[in-house]
Image (cartoon, rainbow, N blue to C red):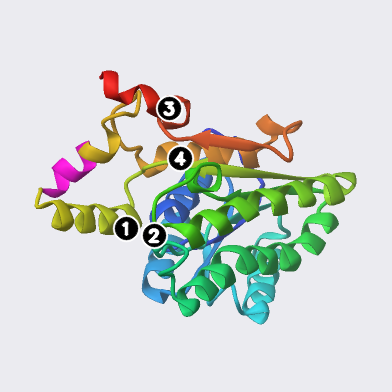
Amino acid sequence: MNGTLKGKVALITGGGSGLGAAVARRFSKAGGSVVVTGRREGLLKAVAEETSGKAVTGSVMDKNHLSRAVETAVRKFGGLDMVIANAGIISGADVMSIKENDWQQMLDINLTGVMNTVQAAIPALINRGGGSIVNISSVAGIMGIAESTGYCTIKSALLGLTRSLAIDYGQHGIRANTLCPGWFSSEMSDMEMAELAAEKGISKAEAIDRVTQYLPLKRMADPDEIAACVEFLASDNASFVTGTVLVADGGGAIVDVGMLGFL
């Protein structure tokens, strides 16, 4: 235990797997207490047991569920200091082919779900004398990705929401920042690599090599590496950082795609 988050209490949405679970584990090791939420009860309970935290099953579209999650943090651990808005889904399609239901579901979970989460949490953060909000966007929020019109649009919108939160609630001691991860090992990336492998007639390992070949670091991240970025933004080590975007993408955003033909 490094004590970075000693005495701090975090609410983590989408906490049953992937990045959310990695964040819960890292926060617990850093001395923090966690409340994890999500729709898959078994996974949530396993993470809560591993981290000595609490699991509250439900959807970010259910405001009553989120109120219960915040109340659980206050009742069980004495308050709420940090919110990690991580719950999200992905669906690929261009503007002309995206289905209305897919668009609406991504909008509901990836954007409105974050709004619902912070609305439920802000009073508890204010009562605590301030706190930190970390919204999980994506590199898709800062650059274009083929056949991802809904995902890119909504992940971009998260940046605006974060800036608004930073401006409006900084006076209450609340910081708000956005993390934009690139490729990291997760259930979602596994699904995407399997789809790419099937489409190209290659192995999953070859699919991973294909999507990371132009990254300066030439690999996907481990979830804990991304969780470390979340820890920094959430912790007092980032006490004067608010309204900003941290990109953790292995250097992909710095690559001049127009020069790749020379490689």
Q: Is residue 80 above or below residue 120?
A: above
Write down the quadrant of residue 157 in the picture. Answer: bottom right
User: Helix, strand or loop at disc 3?
Assistant: loop
What span is in magenta? 203-209
The amino acid marked with disc number 1 is Glu
Residue designated by label 3? 251
Report the front residue among 9 and 117: 117
- The amino acid on which the numbered mark 4 sits, given as a three-letter code, is Ile
* Number of numbered callouts drawn: 4
Q: Mark 4 touching mark 1, by CB under 8 A?
A: no
Asked if the magenta segment contains residue 204, the reply would be yes
Q: Give the image location of residue 50, x and y in percent.
A: 41, 57
Question: Could you tell me how far apart the alpha carbons at marks 4 and 2 are, in whole angstroms?
Answer: 14 Å
Q: Earlier in the sequence, mark 4 or mark 3?
A: 4
- Mark 1 lies on residue: 187
What kind of secondary structure does the magenta stretch mostly adopt? helix
- Marks 4,3: beta carbons within 8 A: no
Residue nearest the observer in this picture, 90 or 263: 263
Q: Is residue 193 left or right of residue 200?
A: right
Q: Earlier in the sequence, mark 4 or mark 2?
A: 2
- The picture quadrant where one finds residue 12 is bottom right
Q: Amino acid at mark 2?
A: Ser
Q: Relative to 220, is 33 above or below? A: below
Residue assigned mark 4: 226
Q: Position of residue 146 (x, y in %)?
A: 39, 51
> Which circle's residue, 1 or 2, is located before the other in the chain?
2
Which is more foreground, mark 4 or mark 3? 3
Kindly check if marks 1 and 2 are in contact, taking CB atoms under 8 A apart as contact.
yes
Residue at the spot of label 2:
17
For this view, does 175 lie left or right of residue 190? Answer: right
